């Protein structure tokens, strides 16, 4: 019995020594990130049978376990992923908002308003060189802001691509580390003697870090059965098996029954295009997975397959087809319900060795990918892509509307020579053909365009008329038809239409490098009049702007050195261009409140230029406020979830100090048991003497 008492004391000392060491370890790691509070589970030793009953043999430290609640931890992981997603978007959107901060800077809205007011001023002072120079200055300020805004958006998109690549790399590294930790746990886990607490802490810390990058689900069925999934259900880690993700470039998928050729596309877009064939040579296009269908500028949503060798512009892309046995000019044929899925951007893919990669960012819902990676994809594709498209649409409409009016007017002087600013790849193809790729080809209409010729020295009218596209010399004059007439036909019409009574050709049109040039005969100058076709504006002849987007918009370089060719006047039916006539400038000035057609790939709107830009700024502000609100909201939820998890797993110093005192007292009491047993031995030995 005395020996049993000695053993009880000895075991109690050992057990409480373990408890004191564990408590000390908790205190030492109270500020260690990822550390989970540990406790000792005491187990009663097996008693032995004796009279008058079982005699206890004390206790021992059965195991050191972690105070961890998987339910609370999973709740935190979910909220943490959402918080990091919205917080990252909030930070990025606040940066984007500064580019369009109209409240504190002299931004695009003010400069666009000043630009249009400059035209109104010119309409009242058309002979003033100072007013013309001021208009040039205002235009350069405006175009610079357009270009800077587009460049800032493009730079931010490139940053998002860099961030996506870094995030993908970090995710894969964490996946590798998790698989390695799982392998170590599988080898060393041997409860209760070795619960691998430090390895489990490390694994949960890695999972927490992973949850900041992507939204994940954890399936924990014990230390040796631990799996991590994306919210969409794709596994990232299954015990020791790992699945990586990647960021891959533009691609397309073919879902055709019999077509074995290739689709080619040029350009980039934040949108994913679905092409669905409705006949052998016709198809529809959607950017929202078939919910709505893209329309061209004429309101048509059915597109025709381009022949081999030709390209078709749809939204921000230019598509073409090739195939075995198809020669240039042949039209490929398809089956009804054939589909192509075009993804003209980088995308995040999930990889499994036994199957094709899966695009996990396809038609992205940010919360399905979640975390910082989801935020980067969301901002790049659904925010910046939209703002870029709207800014380009606004610039394109401004360029077209101003040039459309300006090209029908005259300045202080006529022209001896003029070069268009639009370069065509195909000068033999009808200007309005779907296969033309130059900007504004789809805005041309059937009609006529007028030219007026004057004696260069006296200003005396020599001849006037419209272009005649009847090249037979027999019958009535023929108007321009964009579906029929090419740039070569335009040059021929100019050369054939303006011959004086002496048989002298008053103007010669040539095509150099795909651009139209017009040169007057000696002693002759020409001016431009009414044009119902839009041909001069589309070809960059007698225009105010050059370019076709926010990144390329600029004042026609010719006007910087020749402000006298800024058009303010219109020519009347008697071939007189009154210098004091400010009709053209007045019409341009009225664009401030005149509704115009503004096209993006997802909609066509009739709205004034200033109102449309105000809408862009409003959308950016609304998106920023939404991101800020959600970041604050999910931060609160994440903090609450962390508090709940830490109430179980965290180290409370006050509690640990209380336990330390408790175990210290137990240790002292156990030592007293040993002392008592020793005294009992001494007594027994004394009896023998």
Image (cartoon, rainbow, N blue to C red):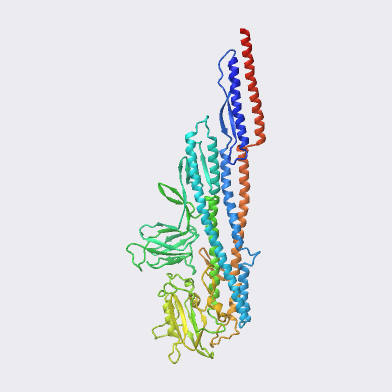
Tell me what residue is drawn at x 60 percent, y 83 percent.
581
Whether residue 224 is visible: no
Residue 343: percent from the left, percent from the top?
Answer: 46, 58
Q: Position of residue 237 (x, y in %)?
A: 48, 43
Residue at horizontal 61 percent and vertical 7 percent from the top: 688
| Residue found at the very far left of the displayed protein | 325
Q: Is residue 433 above or below residue 76?
A: below
Please state the horizontal and vertical placement of residue 302, each as a whole percent of the image.
44, 65
Asked if 71 appears above or below 445 in the picture, the reply is above
- Residue pictured at 59% horizontal, 32% vertical: 39
- Answer with the quarter of the image where residue 308 lies: bottom left
Residue positioned 35% across, 59% down in the render: 260
Q: Is residue 404 above or below residue 214?
A: below
Q: Foreground: 147 or 366?
A: 147
Query: Front-most of 300 and 413?
Result: 413
Q: Is residue 84 left or right of residue 319?
A: right
Residue 222: percent from left, percent from top? 51, 36
On the rendered image, what quadrant is the N terminus found in?
Answer: top right
* Image side of residue 585 versus residue 286, left or right: right
**Count of residue discs:** 0
């Amino acid at each position: 019995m005395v020996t049993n008492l000695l053993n009880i004391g000895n075991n109690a000392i050992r057990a409480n020594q373990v408890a004191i060491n564990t408590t000390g370890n908790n205190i030492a790691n109270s500020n260690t990130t990822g550390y989970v509070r540990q406790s000792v589970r005491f187990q009663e030793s097996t008693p032995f049978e004796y009279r008058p009953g079982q005699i206890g043999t004390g206790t021992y430290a059965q195991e050191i376990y972690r105070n961890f609640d998987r339910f609370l931890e999973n709740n935190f992981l979910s909220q943490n992923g959402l918080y990091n997603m919205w917080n990252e978007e909030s930070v990025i959107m606040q940066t984007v908002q500064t580019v369009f901060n109209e409240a504190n800077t002299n931004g695009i809205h003010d400069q666009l308003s000043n630009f249009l007011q400059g035209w109104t001023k010119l309409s009242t002072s058309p002979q003033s060189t100072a007013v013309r120079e001021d208009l040039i200055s205002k235009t350069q300020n405006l175009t610079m802001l357009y270009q800077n805004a587009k460049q800032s958006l493009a730079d931010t998109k490139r940053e998002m691509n860099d961030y996506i690549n870094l995030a993908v790399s970090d995710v894969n590294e964490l996946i590798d580390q998790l698989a390695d930790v799982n392998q170590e746990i599988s080898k060393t886990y041997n409860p209760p003697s070795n619960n691998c607490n430090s390895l489990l802490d490390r694994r949960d810390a890695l999972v927490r870090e992973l949850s900041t990058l992507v939204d994940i689900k954890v399936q924990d069925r014990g230390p040796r059965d631990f799996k991590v999934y994306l919210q969409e259900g794709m596994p990232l880690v299954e015990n020791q098996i790992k699945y990586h993700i990647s960021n891959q470039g533009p691609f397309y998928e073919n879902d055709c029954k019999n077509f074995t050729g290739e689709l080619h596309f040029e350009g980039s877009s934040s949108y994913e295009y679905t092409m669905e064939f409705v006949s052998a040579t016709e198809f529809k296009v959607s950017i929202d997975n078939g919910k709505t269908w893209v329309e061209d500028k004429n309101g048509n949503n059915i597109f025709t397959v381009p022949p081999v060798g030709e390209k078709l512009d749809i939204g921000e892309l230019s598509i073409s087809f090739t195939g075995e046995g198809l020669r240039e000019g042949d039209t490929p044929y398809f089956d009804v319900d054939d589909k192509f899925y075009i993804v003209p951007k980088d995308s995040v893919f999930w990889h499994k060795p036994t199957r094709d990669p899966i695009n996990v960012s396809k038609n992205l819902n940010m919360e399905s990918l979640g975390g910082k990676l989801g935020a980067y994809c969301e901002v790049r594709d659904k925010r910046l892509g939209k703002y870029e498209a709207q800014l380009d649409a606004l610039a394109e409409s401004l360029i077209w509307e101003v040039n459309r009016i300006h090209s029908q007017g005259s300045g202080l002087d006529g022209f001896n020579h003029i070069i268009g600013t639009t370069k065509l790849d195909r000068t033999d193809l009808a200007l309005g053909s779907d296969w033309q790729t130059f900007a504004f080809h789809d805005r041309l209409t059937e009609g006529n365009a007028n030219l007026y010729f004057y004696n260069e020295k006296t200003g005396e009218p020599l001849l006037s008329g419209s272009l005649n596209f009847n090249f037979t010399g027999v019958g009535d004059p023929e108007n321009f038809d964009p579906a029929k007439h090419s740039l070569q036909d335009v040059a021929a019409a100019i050369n054939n239409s303006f011959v004086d009574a002496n048989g002298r050709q008053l103007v010669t049109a040539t095509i150099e490098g795909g651009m139209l040039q017009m040169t007057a005969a000696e002693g002759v100058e020409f001016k431009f009049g009414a044009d119902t076709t839009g041909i001069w504006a589309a070809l960059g002849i007698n225009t105010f702007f050059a370019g076709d987007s926010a990144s390329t918009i600029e004042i026609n370089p010719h006007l910087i050195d020749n402000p006298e060719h800024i058009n303010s006047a219109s020519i009347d039916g008697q071939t007189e261009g009154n210098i004091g006539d400010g009709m053209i400038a007045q019409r341009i000035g009225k664009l401030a409140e005149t509704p115009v057609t503004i096209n993006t790939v997802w909609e066509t709107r009739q709205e004034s230029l200033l109102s449309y830009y105000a809408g862009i700024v409003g959308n950016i502000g609304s998106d920023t406020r939404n991101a800020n609100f959600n970041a604050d909201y999910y931060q609160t939820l994440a903090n609450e979830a962390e508090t709940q998890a830490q109430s179980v797993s965290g180290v409370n110093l006050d509690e640990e100090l209380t336990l330390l005192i408790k175990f210290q007292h137990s240790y002292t009491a156990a030592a007293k048991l040993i002392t008592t047993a020793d005294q009992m031995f001494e007594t027994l030995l004394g009896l023998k003497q």
